[in-house]
Image (tube, grey):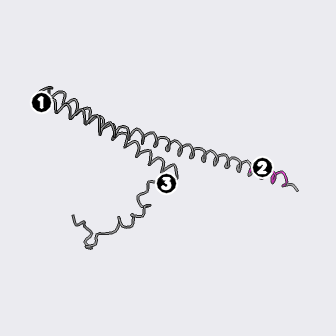
Amino acid sequence: MFQGGRLRAGVALAEAEHRAAVELFRQSVLRAFAEVESALAAEGHLSRELAALATAAGEAEAAARRLAEERYRNGLGDYLAVLEAQRQELDTRGRELTVHRALLEERVNLHLALGGDLAGGAGPGAATAAAPPADGTGESSR
């Protein structure tokens, strides 16, 4: 009889903690969905950019370099033009590699957002990677 108020307060506290936990879970789920959506959007954008850069590096810059080299061989241009064309081609390839790296980083972010981890022992090849060499010496045969 004297514990009625204390029991009701305990129930009210438990319900409030439950509501707080549900809200925290809801926020976590929404944050995870936002991270996945962001990673997918970034990957799509980076994939398109990578394809455009690959085309530019593969065609336009190489053609400009070949033209500059041909003009130099025929005495119609100087070697500075050849070097500039090579520099532009290498700059484009460098941008392509930068975008490719960013794409790989976004894939890792997507993996993490979907609940994956970066633990080295979690993959299917972990057991074979840790196995000693077949010769039994414990040293690599290289």
Q: Report the Cα–Cα distance between label 1 and label 3.
A: 58 Å
Q: Earlier in the sequence, mark 1 or mark 2?
A: 2
Would you call the spot at circle 3 few (<14 residues within 10 Å), some (14-19), or many (20 or more)?
A: few
Q: Kindly state the secondary structure of the residue where label 3 is placed.
A: loop
Q: Is residue 46 left or right of residue 18?
A: left
Residue plotted at (40% across, 42% down) = 102
Q: Which mark is residue 12?
A: 2
Q: Nearer the viewer, residue 15 or 140?
A: 140
Would you call the spot at circle 2 few (<14 residues within 10 Å), some (14-19), or many (20 or more)?
A: few
Residue 128 falls in image quadrant:
bottom left
The image shows residue 141 at horizontal and vertical percentages of 22, 67
Q: Which mark is residue 116?
A: 3
The kind of residue tagged 3 is Gly
Q: Which residues are magenta?
A: 3-13
Mark in the foreground, 1 or 2? 1
Q: Pointer 3 and pointer 2: residues touching (CB < 8 Å)?
A: no
Q: Kindly state the secondary structure of the residue where label 2 is placed.
A: helix
Q: Report the Cα–Cα distance between label 3 and label 2.
A: 37 Å
Q: Earlier in the sequence, mark 3 or mark 2?
A: 2
The kind of residue tagged 2 is Ala
Mark in the foreground, 3 or 2? 3
Q: Kindly state the secondary structure of the residue where label 1 is placed.
A: loop
The image shows residue 81 at horizontal and vertical percentages of 19, 27
Q: Report the Cα–Cα distance between label 1 and label 2.
A: 91 Å
